[in-house]
Image (cartoon, grey):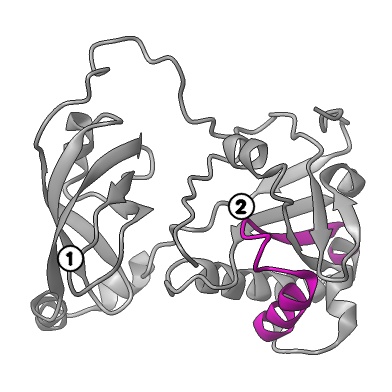
């Protein structure tokens, strides 16, 4: 592995924005009781069967490898908010579960989560765990290919504040990659308004679908996200892909769970 990021001048901000809150507290306070009741009444419910991959109690979520959900989506691994949060205390990686997926217009969660069996390793000491980057962790010098077909690496951003997020351009869920990229566009506009800060800040969107997300695809996607076709965009906000050979190590460091199925 290449030398790690450990210079005192480096400030790495790792933004894992794939689970954003749909509404602010202010919006919730402003909603009338009848409106809230109508929203709940309009929610759709689906039956889920799957397996727990990991539990994030601080976020109130669990990563679930779910079987196909009739009328909703194919099998895949994704994070779900668990309600009530106390249910997370009953879950361990490997546990098979059933639950109700509750879907509103722009958010979803799991209710009535039931463990239908237990992982054989529940009572054993875990041999491995998901690595979650924490403040102060040295970041490996992963190599990437950006929207211009240029080879770049994380260490070249030393001395800047680097905001990094993970995407894939074919992501169909509005609460995931499209929303993350929308938030990055807003951050880019905000930082651009402060020239002193803008010169010390860099945004980096990294795709974990290198086969499809070629430089040409990433370039078009970047222009679409920014609402501009000015190539100067990429001087401060790059779109890149992690090569397939480095993807397992990259995913392991950034706690990314991915699964390739067809397209």
| Circle 2 or circle 1, nearest the eye | 1
Separation of residues labelled 2 and 1 (CA atoms): 27 Å
Q: Nearer the viewer, residue 140 or 235?
A: 140
User: Label 2: how many residues lie within 10 Å, few (<14), some (14-19) or many (20+)?
Assistant: few
Q: Nearer the viewer, residue 6 or 193?
A: 6
First in residue order: circle 2 vs circle 1: 2
> Is 59 displayed left or right of 213 in the figure?
left
Q: Is residue 56 visible?
A: no
Residue 260 vertical placement versus 221 (above, below):
above
Quarter of image, res 5: top right
Residue drawn at the location 53% of the way across and 39% of the way down:
255
Q: Which mark is residue 102?
A: 1
Residue 132 vertical placement versus 35 (above, below):
above
Q: Residue 182 appears at what percent x and percent y?
A: 58, 75
Q: Secondary structure at mark 2?
A: loop
Q: Which mark is residue 63?
A: none
Residue drawn at the location 78% of the way across and 42% of the way down:
142
Q: Is residue 139 visible?
A: yes
Residue drawn at the location 19% of the way across and 75% of the way down:
71
What range of the chain is rendered magenta?
Answer: 198-225
Tell how many labels.
Answer: 2
Q: Residue 127 appears at what percent x and percent y?
A: 43, 14
> Is 42 displayed left or right of 144 in the figure?
left
Q: Nearer the viewer, residue 72 or 190?
A: 72
Q: Which mark is residue 15?
A: 2
Q: Is residue 212 magenta?
A: yes
Q: Nearer the viewer, residue 164 or 98?
A: 98
């Amino acid at each position: 592995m290449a030398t790690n990021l450990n210079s005192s001048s480096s400030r790495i901000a790792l933004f894992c924005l794939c689970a954003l809150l749909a509404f602010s507290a202010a919006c919730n306070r402003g909603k009338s009781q009848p409106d809230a009741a109508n929203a709940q009444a309009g929610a759709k419910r689906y039956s889920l069967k799957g397996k727990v991959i990991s539990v994030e109690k601080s976020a109130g979520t669990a990563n679930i490898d779910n079987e196909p959900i009739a009328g909703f989506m194919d099998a895949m691994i994704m994070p779900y908010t668990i309600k009530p949060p106390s249910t997370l205390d009953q879950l361990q990686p490997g546990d098979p579960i059933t639950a109700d997926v509750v879907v509103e217009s722009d958010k979803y969660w799991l209710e009535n989560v039931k463990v239908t069996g237990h992982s054989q390793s529940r009572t054993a000491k875990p041999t491995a765990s998901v690595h979650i980057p924490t403040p102060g962790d040295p970041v490996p010098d992963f190599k990437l290919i950006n929207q211009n077909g240029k080879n770049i690496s994380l260490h070249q951003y030393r001395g800047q504040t680097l905001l990094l997020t993970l995407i894939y351009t074919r992501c169909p869920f509005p609460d995931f990659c499209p929303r993350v990229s929308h938030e990055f566009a807003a951050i880019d506009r905000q930082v651009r308004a402060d020239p002193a800060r803008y010169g010390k800040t860099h945004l980096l969107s990294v795709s974990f679908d290198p086969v499809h997300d070629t430089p040409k695809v990433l370039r078009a996607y970047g222009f679409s996200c920014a609402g501009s076709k000015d190539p100067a965009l990429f001087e401060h906000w790059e779109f890149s892909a992690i090569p397939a050979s480095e993807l397992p190590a990259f995913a392991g460091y950034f706690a990314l769970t991915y699964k390739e199925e067809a397209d």
